[in-house]
């Protein structure tokens, strides 16, 4: 009984293993399996393409460029002119240029 | 006698060594900033052409991320003073326009063009006329005058 079972098991196992081997030999359906390593890699690549297409990683639009220019000008006004204002204030109070530089650095 | 005189003089006029030391919190800092912002704003207001009669306009850079537009006028029908304040917030790639009544919108197109032109002109004119600085080189146009 046990022998029969054993042989039966062996036969089934061998049979199924053979089938799997045959299946892999064909190997056409599995190339589209996203859970295979290369499938995952191409999936990630696809996500990158999709991400770029959706606008997460793309060059700025014309309006975005203008907004970036506004930001740059604003920083010039605030940083550049504020620093100049400190120098101007201190100069009006009679400080020398050396002290103005020193004070600007301390602020 | 000379020591006493020196001490008395020091009490009256102060120590020259300490008066030249840079105080970290200058008491006049805020007032100076306000005055300068007001001067900047006077220039900023004129960037958009003539101000209509009876209107008062202000346009200035409040800080590194904010521009303020303020306009005030008398309503022709009611005679009441009306005003509007618009805040432009600088974001990474967009400019948010904040108006009264919790109205928010990212500006685009013509309005964005005009703001960009105004901001660059503001820098050039304010640098030159308020701070006496050449906007191209950043150098002082005239030497600072002591008060």
Image (cartoon, coloured by chain):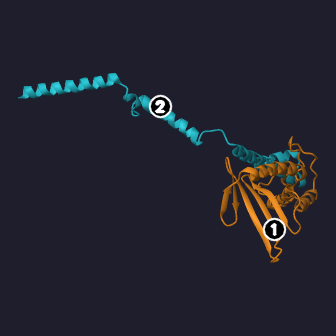
Chain colours: A cyan, B orange
Out of A83 and B65, give the one closest to the viewer. B65
Residue B3 location (% of width, % of height): 90, 57
Distance between the alpha carbons at the discs numbered 2 and 1 = 60 Å
For disc 2, the neighbor class at 10 Å (few under 14, some 14 to 19, many from 20) is few
Q: Which residue reaches farthest bottom?
A: B78
Q: Nearer the viewer, mark 2 or mark 1?
A: 2
Residue B43 location (% of width, % of height): 87, 56
* Residue A84 shows in this picture: no
* Residue A19 shows in this picture: yes
Q: Is residue A63 above or below residue B27?
A: above
Residue B115 location (% of width, % of height): 78, 52
Numbered disc total: 2
Are dots 2 and 1 on a single chain? no
Residue A72 occupies quadrant: top right
Q: Which residue appears at 87% of the width and 46% of the height? A: A97
Q: Which residue appears at 55% of the width and 35% of the height? A: A49
Q: Which residue in the protein does label 2 denote?
A: A42
Label 1: state its secondary structure. Answer: strand
Chain of residue at mark 2: A
Residue A50 location (% of width, % of height): 54, 38
Q: Left or right of A32: which side holds A5? A: left
Q: Which residue reaches farthest left?
A: A1
Q: Which residue in the protein does label 1 denote?
A: B72
For disc 1, the neighbor class at 10 Å (few under 14, some 14 to 19, many from 20) is some
Out of A73 and B105, give the one closest to the viewer. B105
Out of B61 and B29, give the one closest to the viewer. B61
Q: Is residue A62 above or below residue A25?
A: below
Quadrant where the C terminus of chain B sits is: bottom right
Check residue B122 in the rendering and tell me which mark sits there, or answer none.
Answer: none
Label 2: state its secondary structure. Answer: helix
Out of B8 and B89, give the one closest to the viewer. B89
């Amino acid at each position: 009984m046990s022998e029969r079972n054993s042989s039966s098991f062996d036969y089934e196992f061998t049979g199924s293993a053979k089938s799997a081997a045959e299946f892999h030999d064909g190997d056409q359906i599995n190339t589209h399996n996203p859970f295979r390593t290369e499938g995952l890699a191409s999936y990630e690549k696809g996500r990158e393409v999709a991400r770029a297409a959706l606008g997460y990683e793309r060059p700025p639009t014309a309006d975005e460029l203008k907004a970036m220019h506004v930001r740059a000008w604003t920083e010039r006004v605030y940083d550049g002119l504020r620093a100049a204002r400190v120098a101007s204030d201190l100069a009006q109070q009679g400080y020398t240029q050396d002290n103005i530089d020193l004070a600007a650095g301390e602020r | 006698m000379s020591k006493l005189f020196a001490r008395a003089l020091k009490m009256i006029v102060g120590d020259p060594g300490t008066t030249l030391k840079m105080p970290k919190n200058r008491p006049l800092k805020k007032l100076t900033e306000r005055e300068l912002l007001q001067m900047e704003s006077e220039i900023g207001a004129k960037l958009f052409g003539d101000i209509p009669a009876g209107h008062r306009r202000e346009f200035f850079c409040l800080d590194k991320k904010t521009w303020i537009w303020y306009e005030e006028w008398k309503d022709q029908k009611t005679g009441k003073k009306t005003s509007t304040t618009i805040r432009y917030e600088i974001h990474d790639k967009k400019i948010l326009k904040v108006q009264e009544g919790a109205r928010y919108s990212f500006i685009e197109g013509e309005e964005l063009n005009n703001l960009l032109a105004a901001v660059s002109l503001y820098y050039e004119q304010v640098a030159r006329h308020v701070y006496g600085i050449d906007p191209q080189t950043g150098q002082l146009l005239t030497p600072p005058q002591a008060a």
